[in-house]
Image (cartoon, grey):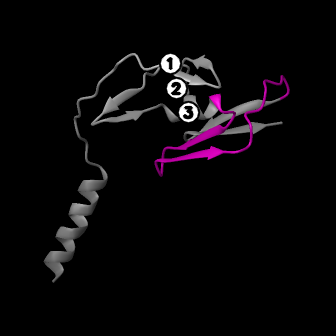
Amino acid sequence: MVTTAIIATSMTAYTASMRKTITVDYKDIKINVDGKRIEPKDGNGKSVEPFIYEGTTYLPVRAVSEALGKQVLWDGKTYTIDILSTPIEEKDEKKIKIWLFGLCRILH
């Protein structure tokens, strides 16, 4: 019984950190939001491209969410993406963005 528990725990830990190599199709997929073309970028401003894998099209969540006026937060510890209804605030010289452990906070 103890052996079974140890194996199950080991398998769970292994599965959680497993990597898989996949083949995807890049077909120059374009994204339009309300008729306006967006050029998807990651959190660092680097271009990212949508792709197709096994018949499903995958879009960069940050680029699409921000184009829809949503705020996106990434928690690198828990591998969690939060998409907030609060619109992204316009640039204001009196506000400072602080990035800590993959999370963004805006200080006034």
- At mark 3, the secondary structure is helix
CA–CA distance between discs 2 and 3? 7 Å
Which residue is tagged 3?
Answer: 62
Residue 81 is one of the magenta-drawn residues: yes
Whether 80 is drawn above or below 52: the answer is below
- Of residues 19 and 23, the one drawn nearer to the viewer in this rendering: 23
Counting other residues with Cα less than 10 Å from the Cα at mark 1, is it few (<14), some (14-19), or many (20 or more)?
few
Q: Position of residue 3 (x, y in %)?
A: 14, 76
76 inside magenta stretch: yes
Residue position marked by numbered label 1 in the rendering: 46
N-terminal label among 2 and 3:
2
Of the numbered discs 1 and 3, the one sitting upstream in the chain is 1
Q: Which secondary structure, mark 1?
A: loop
Image quadrant assignment for residue 97: top right
Q: Which residue is mark 2?
A: 42
Residue placed at 33% from the left, 20% from the top?
Answer: 26
Q: Nearer the viewer, mark 1 or mark 3?
A: 3
Q: Report the span colored magenta.
A: 67-94
Q: Residue furthest bottom?
A: 1
Label 3 packing within 10 angstroms: few (<14), some (14-19), many (20+) = many
**Outermost front residue:** 35
Residue 106 falls left or right of residue 102: right
Question: Is label 2 in contact with label 3 (beta carbons under 8 Å)?
Answer: yes
Helix, strand or loop: magenta stretch: loop
Mark 3: amino acid: Arg
Residue 68 percent coordinates (x, y):
65, 33
